[in-house]
Image (tube, grey):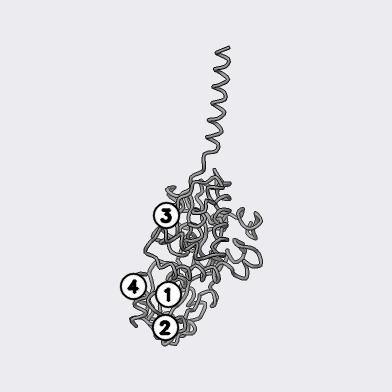
Amino acid sequence: MKLLSGLKLLAVGALLAGSAQAAEPTRIKFAFNFTLDGSAGPYLLALERGYFKEQGLDVTIDPSSGSGDAVTRVASGTYQMASADFSTLVEFASRQPAVTPKVVFVMYERAPQAIISLSSAGIKKPADLAGKTVGGGNADGPARLFPALMRIADVDPSKITYKQISPQLRDSMLLTGQVDAVIGNDYTSWFNLKGRGAKRENVDILEYADFGLDVYSNSIIASQALLRDKPEAVRKFIAAALKGWRDAIADPAAATKAVAARNRLIDPVLETERLQFLIDHKVKTPNVQKYGIGYVDADRMKKNIATITESFELPAAPPVSLVYDPQFAPGGKSAVQ
């Protein structure tokens, strides 16, 4: 009887251990696409309010040095998910298809790349750059897509003086008159300028999207291993992140407060304005209002990939199926199959 009782106790113990093991949360390391500023607020708010934990996920969120770094971290397996620029992911996929992560959810439906200038320069359209000096990076998305914009706008690039400068100096050089215009992401450059005292009425922002170059932008990406082994964890992560975005849209200041708890160097007021700008201009677009956040159009994505391939001088255009998994789109489907 004692042996039978002992076996029963062992069996119960094994069942309890199995239940505990089954309830073990899935760990996901998430790399943000840059430093933790206002744009990271929705994710940090979801973390702070326990939305990931509610989904059975143990999530950590870390900054990175940029989308290229974030993509590489996920591809290497040190991180399972990240936010990253779509163009950067396409470039990575063309060169290392065997390990490339995939977009699982598009967050910024409208492209942020832009030409930014002081109004005194009189740059109201791309053609006005002729005879001007433009400052920008070497390998970032706005710089790599700039030649494509010039082709679409029928502007001779030989008539533009391009000065390669670091992102850290770019906006200061614009304010001090060392360049006539800069190219960068609007939500980065404009708020950098505002933080240095610039007034919106004195700054012109020409978005690439308004001149025929509207590419998908920041997206949530996941590793091939996670998509293969734990696709439900990806779905749960997106659900929790969207709750964070919902709360951030309702109360941007709360999201910025969550960022300030991690990055005490930010200006909470400025970062709240940056987040509101992103919500209004990149997230709540007409397409999103019509189809839902995360919707992807098949033809547009294919055209985006073709444009990125040409602009970045890639060896080949990766197929949509290599860079995008449609199963997590609104309603569990997408125009891309």
Q: Which SS class for mark 4?
A: helix
Q: Are marks 3 and 1 in contact (CB under 8 Å)?
A: no
In this rendering, the answer to whether 91 lies above or below 286 is above
Q: Are marks 4 and 1 in contact (CB under 8 Å)?
A: no
Viewer-proximal residue, 132 or 69?
69
Q: Which SS class for mark 3?
A: strand
Marks 4/1: CA–CA distance: 12 Å
Q: Is residue 4 left or right of residue 164?
A: right
List the residue tagged with mark 1.
183
In this rendering, the answer to whether 133 lies above or below 99 is below
Label number found at residue 118: 2
Marks 3/2: CA–CA distance: 34 Å
Q: Where, by quadrant of the figure, is residue 4 drawn? A: top right
In the rendered structure, which amino acid carries the disc numbered 1? Ile
Q: Which SS class for mark 1?
A: strand
Provide residue 268's location: percent of width, then percent of height: 43, 67
List the residue tagged with mark 3.
62
Between label 3 and label 2, give the one nearer the viewer. Answer: 3
List the residue tagged with mark 4.
169
Q: First in sequence, mark 1 or 2: give its number.
A: 2
Q: First in sequence, mark 4 or 1: give its number.
A: 4
Q: Where, by quadrant of the figure, is residue 56 drawn? A: top right
Q: Are marks 3 and 2 in contact (CB under 8 Å)?
A: no
Q: First in sequence, mark 3 or 1: give its number.
A: 3
Marks 3/1: CA–CA distance: 27 Å
In the rendered structure, which amino acid carries the disc numbered 4? Leu
Please name the residue shown 55% across and 36% down the image: 22
